[in-house]
Amino acid sequence: AQVDQQMGLTQAVAKAIADDRRQASCDHSQQELFRQRIYALALGYEDLNDHQELRHDLALQTATSRVEALASPSTLCRFEQRSDRGAAVAIHQVLFDQFVKAHDRPPKRLILDFDATDTPLHGEQEGRFFHGYYDHYCFLPLYVFCGRHLLVSYLRRSDRDGARHTWAILSLLVKALRQHWPKVEIIFRGDSGFSRWKVLRWCDRHDVRYIVGVAKNQRLERQAAELMALAEELHGLTGKKQRLFRSIQYGARSWDRARRVIVKAEHSSHGANPRFVVTNLSQTDQYLYDKIYCARGDMENGIKDQQLDLFAGRTSCHSWWPNQFRQLLSGLAYTLFEGLRTRALQNTILAKASPNRIRLTLLKIGAVVIRNTRRIRFLLSSACPHQDLFRTAVYRLNSS
């Protein structure tokens, strides 16, 4: 709650979304509903049914700035069901504003990581389709990160191209970022699922750098055959894994022109493992592959944080927009944890920890709560193994 107050996260979201309820009949403000739902996700409570008991929890009431019972599951359900496209746009704007506020000075370079994942479905939700690659019914949400900051959490149907709407989202982000920082260098990064020549052409025309994987095919393997053969020969002589790099000019027949493609020819005891990456960056082949392209793996940890630790895959509503809303609630909870890491956990063992580890170390610990008309007291065990870390976090939040 203290991190949320400093960031102004739920306050900004509540102001950005119109509340069409008759206010005289409302017991719970929209900001309180956001706080209750987001804090519960952060604490590990994924279902609305959990709030039947949570609404009477003194600690959660305190965090939500109430002394009465919190909203019931049915109230929270109506809160989610009235969400629409406008709410999704407004929450994305808040996520972007939080990203901008996190920078004290204009950054020199920003790397926008695009990736898609699957959200398995077990009901008859709107937009439900079977995906051949994942081998089940699912949604195919698109995530965009910049470092550890979440920018886009966009729910999509799974019967479309995995790169669908990438061009439009990238264009909106680039224009918005350059309004704040006109001189910033922007790099578009993604795996082979985002290798679309129209997106690459747009990047070339708008001075956006890119480094994107390219799926293997016979033409690429023929052009890389000599380098792959050399890697195999060196592996046979040394018995050690060999990694060789080279740039080639490659353009598929559907592309508008040929582009630089980095070839990684790798051979080990498991055999050949070639990889291909298209880029318009100017650094050396190995540096671009190892230091720039492979670093996109950290984004997948951010996706796991939301899908596994913060329940972004809990899209069990029948209607489309409530499911998108739930995914964005998970994104707001993730942003809250990122704020906690930045403000209170720098240079500690939890500086890069997952939300679940932070939750079990600092939040889900035993305490006695005593509340009267004047004060609320939390009595924590003197045998708590992480009490020094807890004190450090509290001190830093009080000092910021």
Image (cartoon, rainbow, N blue to C red):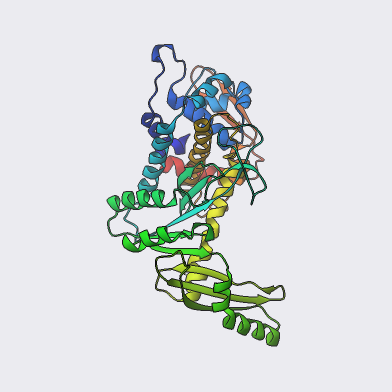
Q: Residue at x 46, y 15 (%)?
A: 27
Measured from the top left, where is residue 333 in percent x and y? 51, 39
Q: Residue furthest bottom?
A: 237
Q: Nearer the viewer, residue 28 or 200?
A: 200
Q: Quadrant of the C terminus?
A: top left
Is residue 354 shown to the viewer in this render?
Answer: no
Is residue 308 depicted above or below 197 in this figure? Answer: above
Q: Residue at x 39, y 47 (%)?
A: 99
Is residue 375 depicted above or below 230 in this figure? Answer: above
Is residue 225 depicted above or below 52 in this figure? Answer: below
Q: Is residue 364 left or right of residue 251?
A: right
Measured from the top left, where is residue 154 in percent x and y? 48, 43
Q: Quadrant of residue 208?
A: bottom left
Q: Is residue 113 left or right of residue 304?
A: left
Q: Residue furthest top?
A: 25
Measured from the top left, where is residue 297 in percent x and y? 55, 59
Q: Residue at x 32, y 54 (%)?
A: 105
Measured from the top left, where is residue 64 in percent x and y? 49, 27
Q: Nearer the viewer, residue 97 or 227?
A: 227
**Looking at the image, how many numbered discs can be counted on the residues?**
0
Is residue 306 shown to the viewer in this render?
Answer: yes
Q: Nearer the viewer, residue 260 or 98?
A: 260
